[in-house]
Image (cartoon, rainbow, N blue to C red):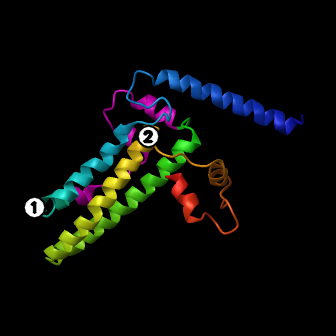
Amino acid sequence: MNAIHCTAVKQEKKAITIYQHYKILVENENINPQTLLATDYLNHFNEVHMLLDMIGDMPDCLEDIQDWQEKSYKQHFLESSFNAKELAIEAYDHSPPEHRIPFENTVDSMNFLVLTTIEETEKAMTGGNLQLLEHIISSYKPQMEEYIEQCSAIINGTKHIAQQEDIDSYFMDEPASEGGLDQNSIDDLF
């Protein structure tokens, strides 16, 4: 066995030991012991989702919606009143890539959808186009509900996990194949 292989094996064993340690630490907290992720993060999206859903009937919500900003998982917990927020932040770094990568990809999609919808909502309301506003929200709502459901499933360990090839390419900053990820590979991440 060469030195590089020995080092890799030692690092893998250390990572497993740390993961096992965090699995025990999160056991009595609202953090999933399999994924080391907490559903409390979804509150960041649930709030803006509820406001966007009400915007047609309550146009005064626009200011609150405009104030919404992306927050990383760690940033959310730094600013939250979640009881085990420090543990949630620490455990995140040890969440297995097969869970964390699809989670991060889903969160990226959620952020994009919310920010795009906020921008479109502002334009429709500024222009007084209530039909367009209704169309924007009716298009947004099922997409966001699907993303929230996907994200919750990933956090709770009940959603498909990423394939090893995709995990490896994530860390190497290279596509999994010459042509990049095909649709099936992307779907596997979710």
Helix, strand or loop for the magenta stretch, by majority = helix
Query: Against 87, is 71 above or below?
Result: below
Which quadrant would residue 113 be assigned to in this image?
bottom left
Q: Is residue 69 left or right of residue 92?
A: left
* Mark 1 residue element: loop
Residue 153: say if magenta. no
Q: Name the residue under label 1.
A: 57
Q: Distance between the residues labelled 2 and 1?
A: 33 Å
Relative image position of residue 78 (x, y in whole percent): 39, 38
Residue 78: say if magenta. yes
Relative image position of residue 121 (x, y in whole percent): 23, 68
In this view, the residue farthest toward the left is 57
Q: In this view, does 186 lie to the left or right of 118?
A: right
The residue lying at 45 percent from left, 40 percent from top is 158
Which quadrant would residue 8 be assigned to in this image?
top right
Q: Would residue 69 be seen by someone viewing this image from the given angle?
A: no
Q: Would residue 111 be seen by someone viewing this image from the given angle?
A: yes
Quadrant showing the N terminus: top right
In this view, the residue farthest toward the right is 2
Amino acid type of the residue tagged 1 in the rendering: Asp
The residues colored magenta run 64-92
Amino acid type of the residue tagged 2 in the rendering: Ile
Of circles 2 and 1, the one toward us is 2
79, 36: nearer the viewer = 36
Q: Mark 2 points at which residue?
A: 155
Relative image position of residue 130 (x, y in whole percent): 14, 73
Q: Residues within 10 Å of mark 1 (few under 14, many from 20)?
A: few
